[in-house]
Amino acid sequence: MSKRDDAHEILKCLGVPKQQQNERSCLTLLALAGLSEDDPWSATSRPLHRIWDIMGWMKAKYGKTYAANSRETIRRQTIHQFEPARLINRNPDDPLRPTNSGDTHYQLTAAASVLAAFGKRNFSTQCARFLESFGSLTAAYERARHQVRIPVRLPDGSAVMLSPGAHNELQRHVMEEFAPRFAQGSVVLYLGDTAQKRLVVATDRLARLGIREMHHNKLPDVVLYDDERKWLFLIEAVTTHGPVSPKRHAELELMLKNCPVGRVYVTAFSSFAAFRKYASEIVWESEVWIAEVPDHMIHFNGDKFLGPYPPRITARK
């Protein structure tokens, strides 16, 4: 194994988040340990390094050249995570040095003893002691993420937890404000989540409506089904991605070609300001719902109000 591979294994064992288990972070760790490719881990030292020094070490010892503007990336995407993980101290030589000083230095903490033990029989023990003293940053991030999860009440009274974020907050409004007003009695066939794409997937019910499992990843953010009216609500919650546009509508219609029930296409926005940004992109024969005025909808059609697309034709007696 190369030193980069070793460093990756160490970062993983010390509970550093996956986003920091990359080459940039591995080389940063090696620079802060003062190690070249041929040095044993037992030779780990604790040099004081500025980020410029770290970049210079990467180039001189590992042939990895980062552009000058990568300095901020290293600081924000590696150093900022190494500090709370207690792998490094900032300015141990001068704690009063201003944070934004160009002379800011970083140095390994007691984590140096863990690195020095890599490849030895006591490495696992050293890791365990370190984590017992300082904890895992990954675990801390996970706890924080769960603490701010968004509770969502489904139409059947059950509840699910969505990961935090503006998109999932809007989905919560769709489930708790739109559904009771305009889709009463509907069941949830699909509910996505920004962290885990499939949160609720009623695979059997979708299959009975002609929607095969291979199409689940192409579904809108929320799918509701009203069995009494035989209406399928296909709802896009728009925060950063687009509405039900003509292109998106055509894609969904092709996917739903074997679906025997009426389709109601809805684009949901959190505010009128958000709606105005996308108004020109919304397909005709669809609906718009805005969370800040939950009792109303905007109908992008001329001959009917809320109802399935295409309209069902009832033969005259």
Image: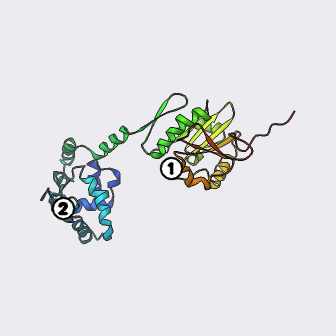
Q: Residue furthest top?
A: 157
Q: Residue furthest left?
A: 93
User: How is this picture coloured?
Assistant: rainbow
Question: Within 10 angstroms of label 2, few (less than 14), some, or many (20 or more) residues?
Answer: many
Tell me which residue sits at (24%, 68%) in the image. Answer: 52
Horizontal and vertical percent for residue 159? 48, 31
The amino acid type found where label 2 is placed reads His
Q: Which of the two discs, 1 and 2, labels the residue nearer the N terminus?
A: 2
The amino acid type found where label 1 is placed reads Thr
Q: Which residue is mark 2?
A: 105
Q: Quadrant of the rendered structure where residue 101 is?
A: bottom left
Left or right: 239 in relation to 141 = right
Tell me which residue sits at (50%, 38%) in the image. Answer: 172
- In this orientation, which residue lies closer to the viewer: 114 or 138? 138
Q: Which mark is residue 23?
A: none
Distance in Å between CA atoms under marks 1 and 2? 40 Å
Can you tell which of label 1 and label 2 is closer to the viewer?
A: 1
Q: Quadrant of the N terminus?
A: bottom left
Tell me which residue sits at (69%, 33%) in the image. Answer: 229
- In this orientation, which residue lies closer to the viewer: 36 or 112? 112
Q: Which residue is mark 1?
A: 239
Q: How many marks?
A: 2
Tell me which residue sits at (66%, 53%) in the image. Answer: 250
Horizontal and vertical percent for residue 208? 65, 36
Horizontal and vertical percent for residue 236? 57, 46
Horizontal and vertical percent for residue 9? 28, 53
Q: Is 187 rendered above or below residue 244?
A: above
